[in-house]
Amino acid sequence: MAKRFAHARRGALAAAAITAVCVVLLVGLLIYDATSGRNAAVRSTTAMATVVTAKVWGPAGEQTAQDVLDRITALDEDCLSAYADTSDVYRINHAAGNPVKVNSYTYNLLVELLDIVRQTNGAFDPTIGALTALWDIGGPDERIPDDGEITAALGAVGWDKLHLADGNVQICKGQLLDLGAVGKGAACDAVHTVLEEDEARSAVISVGGSLLLYGENPEGDDWSVGVRDPRGGSNDRLGTLSIGADLCVSTSGDYERFFEQDGVRYCHILDPATGRPADSGLISVTIISPSGLLSDALSTACFVLGYERSLPVLGLFEGTQALFVTADRTVYVTPGLEGRFTLTADGYTMGAE
Ligand code: ADP
Ligand code: MG
């Protein structure tokens, strides 16, 4: 009994010693953090139906990270969500046929999006909602619709049926807005003001498949961004991109949401020209741009357009670079990314331009 007691006491002492060492280490880390500011504050939440993570270096790190998450949550609830009845998109969709007064943010965003629709020759189209609802890829009702259903849904797709005037937005009956292709990138842009106000030095904000690299990498080098292997698991990398300050990176791929039937993969990015899942020979596209909105919209548009047809479109957007992965596992990069991508996955080759 006494022996057991002594044994337990020794255990308790050892535990106390370990705890003391941990506390010293922790305090040391906190002091290091406060003085050098090298360590980042990291906070995560779920918003926009995805995981949002804010990693911030700066004088008010924890608070800034929380402010970033709050800003993105508010943006979703007030403006972009298709499901929250408080949001502009929800109200527009539920008042089809009638004008809806929206936040100036939403109005200006839609004005910008219509430009991108034109510049991408309609490959990106935020009025695609009736089609995405019909296919419901990744949802409980996913299925291959028949030709008649696709033709009917296509009749409700088209930016020319979306009316913007004096802060009001009106879609036609049967039409549905779907900002799923741009919300995450738009969120990356919206947090710039938060980071500036809080005087953050650097930050990495990740919103699903979109990433903002704010400021310089505190380690001194360029930012290193892993690109997912489109045919690997969620942690498998195709390779690594080396990226400068104040850029956004978005990836669209056919692995995010899809189903397979009779050996054919049906993915969640639809071609507004055919009403069917994009079939352009690409399996993933990554876009790097100073604008989160553009990186997100163009990753979806280029996925629809395919490699060859994307190049002239990308030429319209200064400072925008792209990495394409084709179904035959060739990786192409635009000239600004030459020497900035290291391919590490087996089974892929770099293509000559
Ligand atoms: P993810 O949302 O998986 O990161 P994307 O940014 O490419 O990928 O967005 C895909 C989403 O955009 C789809 O789930 C759908 O809601 C919507 N969408 C699909 N095709 C188009 C398209 N051609 N234009 C605009 N939005 C689209
Ligand atoms: Mg996108």
Image (cartoon, helix red, strand yellow):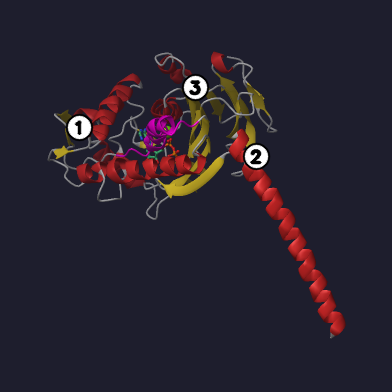
User: Which quadrant of the picture is home to ligand 2?
Assistant: top left
Describe the element under mark 3 as helix, strand or loop: helix
Describe the element under mark 1 as helix, strand or loop: loop
Determine if the magenta segment contains residue 104.
no
Mark 1, ligand 1, within 8 Å: the answer is no
**As shown in the figure, which amino acid type bears the numbered disc 1?**
Leu
Residue 182 placement (x, y as % from top left) = 38, 34
Task: Tell me what residue is drawn at x 39 percent, y 14 percent.
Answer: 316
Which residue lies under the disc numbered 2? 32
Residue 297 placement (x, y as % from top left) = 39, 29
Q: Nearer the viewer, residue 265 or 291?
A: 291
Residue 189 placement (x, y as % from top left) = 40, 30
First along the sequence among labels 2 and 3? 2
Circles 3 and 1, Cβ within 8 Å, touching? The answer is no
**As shown in the figure, which amino acid type bears the numbered disc 3?**
Tyr
Task: Tell me what residue is drawn at x 39 percent, y 50 percent.
Answer: 143
Mark 3, ligand 1, within 8 Å: the answer is no
Q: Which mark is residue 307?
A: 3
Q: CA distance from mark 2 to mark 3?
A: 48 Å
Please identify the quarter of the rendering in which residue 333 is found: top right
Q: CA distance from mark 1 to mark 2?
A: 54 Å
